[in-house]
Image (cartoon, rainbow, N blue to C red):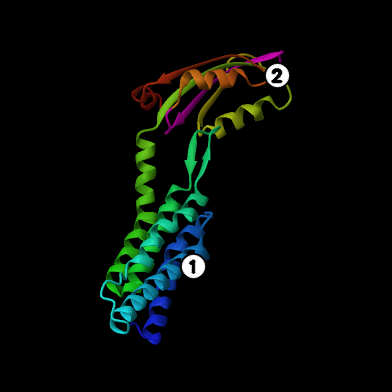
């Protein structure tokens, strides 16, 4: 059986390893941060310790040879799913899902806690370092890939010169993760309407028909066109 001293050491190690991952999430202001990851890790570790001790007690004290030391611990991975679900936010308007990485980190931290509780110190520490590297260094690679596959679009818009119109237009692009690359006024802004050409880029799929219909639904937009700009042409212009 796992002694009290050994169990406390394992719990302390679980707090440390969970805190490493939680620190990275907290630094990025994620929903589940430092304390949440430590709690998940130490809780998983405790479940594993209890599971092992109960099985060994039943085997050696009461003579039950079919006691399963994995039964309690097995419920941790599925049970921690509700925490992960709480960090995932789906925004239909913005057409994106946020929090998947944090949900995955919570699930991984639970596995680390189980590993520490079972006595797999080196493997748990190695997994912690791998997860930390994935969340930090590999994030840069993720950004590079997104930039590489970004598509460029040009909006041709005619809108009324009303108060707050530019702000509404900027919010529209921001909500859909459309990054403004250039802004050109074709007609004079002093008149009743303004004609604009806006170059944007996006790493997400854009349904041109839906975007145009939503743009035309904005107050003050009288005409809107959208076309895909070839990347080679954009590079030449730069």
Q: Which residues are magenta?
A: 190-205
Splitting the image into 4 quarters, where does residue 47 fall?
bottom left
Element type at mark 2: loop
* Residue drawn at 32 percent across, 69 percent down: 115
Quarter of the C terminus within the rendering: top left
Q: Which residue is mark 1?
A: 39
Observer-nearest residue: 72 or 41?
Answer: 72
- In the picture, measured across the screen, residue 155 lies left or right of residue 16, that is right
Number of the label disc, if any, that sits on residue 161: 2
Element type at mark 1: helix
Residue 172 x %, y %: 59, 29
Q: CA distance from mark 1 to mark 2?
A: 54 Å
| Whether residue 112 is visible | no
Q: Is residue 91 above or below residue 161?
A: below
* Residue drawn at 30 percent across, 69 percent down: 68
Observer-nearest residue: 163 or 4?
Answer: 4
Asked if residue 51 is among those painted magenta in the image, a careful observer would answer no
């Amino acid at each position: 059986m796992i002694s009290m001293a050994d169990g406390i050491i394992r719990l302390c190690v679980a707090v440390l390893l969970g805190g490493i991952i939680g620190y990275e999430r907290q630094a990025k202001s994620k929903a589940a941060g430092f304390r949440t990851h430590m709690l998940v890790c130490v809780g998983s570790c405790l479940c594993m310790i209890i599971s092992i001790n109960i099985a060994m007690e039943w085997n050696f004290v009461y003579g039950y040879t079919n006691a399963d030391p994995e039964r309690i611990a097995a419920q941790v991975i599925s049970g921690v799913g509700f925490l992960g679900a709480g960090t995932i936010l789906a925004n239909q308007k913005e057409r994106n899902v946020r929090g998947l990485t944090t949900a995955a980190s919570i699930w991984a931290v639970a596995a680390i806690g189980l590993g520490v509780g079972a006595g797999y110190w080196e493997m748990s520490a190695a997994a912690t370092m791998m997860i930390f590297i994935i969340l930090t260094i590999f994030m840069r690679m993720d950004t590079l890939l997104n930039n590489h596959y970004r598509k460029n679009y040009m909006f041709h818009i005619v809108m009324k010169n009303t108060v707050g119109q530019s702000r509404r237009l900027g919010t529209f692009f921001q909500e859909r993760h459309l990054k403004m690359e250039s802004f050109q006024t074709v007609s004079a802004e002093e008149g009743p309407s303004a004609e604009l050409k806006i170059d944007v880029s996006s790493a997400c799929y854009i349904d041109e028909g839906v975007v145009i219909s939503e743009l035309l639904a904005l107050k003050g937009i009288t005409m809107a066109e959208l076309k895909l700009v070839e990347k080679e042409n954009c590079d030449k212009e730069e």
